[in-house]
Image: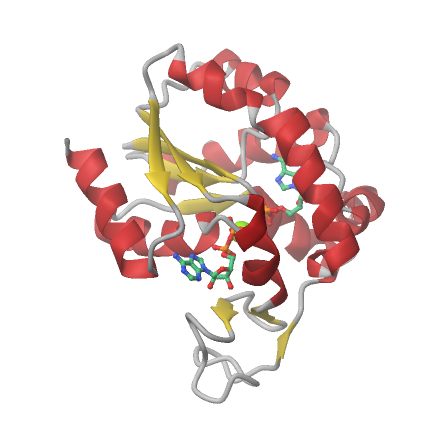
Amino acid sequence: MKLIFLGAPGAGKGTQAEFVCKELSIPAISTGAIIRAALKNQTELGKKAESYMKSGALVPDEVVIEIIKERLSEDDCKNGFLLDGFPRTVVQAEALEGMGIEIDRVVNIVLGDDVIIDRLTNRRVCEGCGATYHLISLPSKDNVHCDKCGKKLILRKDDEPETVVNRLKIYHEQTQPLEDFYAKKNKLINIDGKRELKAVTADILAALKG
Ligand code: AP5
Ligand code: MG
């Protein structure tokens, strides 16, 4: 199955991608995670993306389109994949079509802006492996270290409140039009992202089977 997860920053795309991909045995591909890794390793891509990401702006279309093209050509994508955080603009969605890729479903995790600040300010990510936690709804054993690799948990730089406001604005302006784009193609499934984690996962899996 070839899937896209759409939704505002903090809607739960990454968290649900992990659960759903385990269930469906497909790889989860997060452009955000790929760019963060490049930034950490100070590769050419990381250097190019740094200033955009820090301010909460989108990295230029041509850069992310190239990242996805390369990633989707890898062997593990042959039997399907889940895209978390791509496409983010209509230009990116059209580029995906231009690659000859037929997406089966687009899962739109719907969450009001009021909840997003709580989700992101309470989110902690592992500085080692990038695993994601939430201080209240998905805590690690001690809320300080990662359960998976033992490294320290930190606040993502773009989760500072001022940057979150900018990310939300950009989401409404540039990414939300994709709801219409995919609804017109009868691919959009809206999922209530405000419910507890397991309920959201169950809703997504049920909708994909239906
Ligand atoms: P990216 O990393 O994709 O960030 P984002 O879209 O802003 O989304 P987040 O990762 O913040 O949220 P999420 O929906 O994954 O939520 P999560 O599951 O963590 O992109 C970062 C940056 O990279 C962009 O700003 C841009 O610069 C660049 N970029 C990436 N892709 C790009 C593209 N295609 N084009 C251009 N630029 C691009 O959940 C949030 C928190 O809530 C967690 O703590 C989680 O545990 C908790 N939580 C989740 N669900 C629930 C629930 N149901 N109940 C309670 N808590 C929950
Ligand atoms: Mg994410």
Q: 193 or 178: nearer the eye?
A: 193
Q: How is the image coloured?
A: secondary structure
Can see residue 9? no
Residue 210 place in picture, x, y as percent? 14, 31
Q: Could you tell me which residue is drawn at 59 percent across and 30 percent down?
A: 88
Among the 4 quarters of the image, the one containing residue 4: top left
State which quarter of the image contains the N terminus: top left
Give the left or right position of residue 50, taking residue 1 as reference: right
Q: Say above or below: 106 vs 109.
A: above
Residue 25 point in image, percent of width and height? 25, 48
- Return the x and y of residue 147 as percentages of the image width and height: 44, 81
In the rendered image, the residue lying farthest to the front is 114
Horizontal relation, residue 126 to residue 52: left or right: left
| Camera sees residue 145 | yes
Q: Relative to 94, is 205 on the left or the right? A: left
Image coords of residue 94 (percent x, y):
55, 14
Tell me the residue at 58%/70% (across/down).
124
| Residue under the point 22% across and 44% down | 205
In front of the other: 182 or 97: 182
Q: Quadrant of the rendered structure where residue 173 is? A: top right
Numbered marks: total: 0
Residue that sits furthest to the left in the current view = 210
Q: Is residue 124 above or below residue 111?
A: below
Residue at the location (32% across, 27% down)? 105
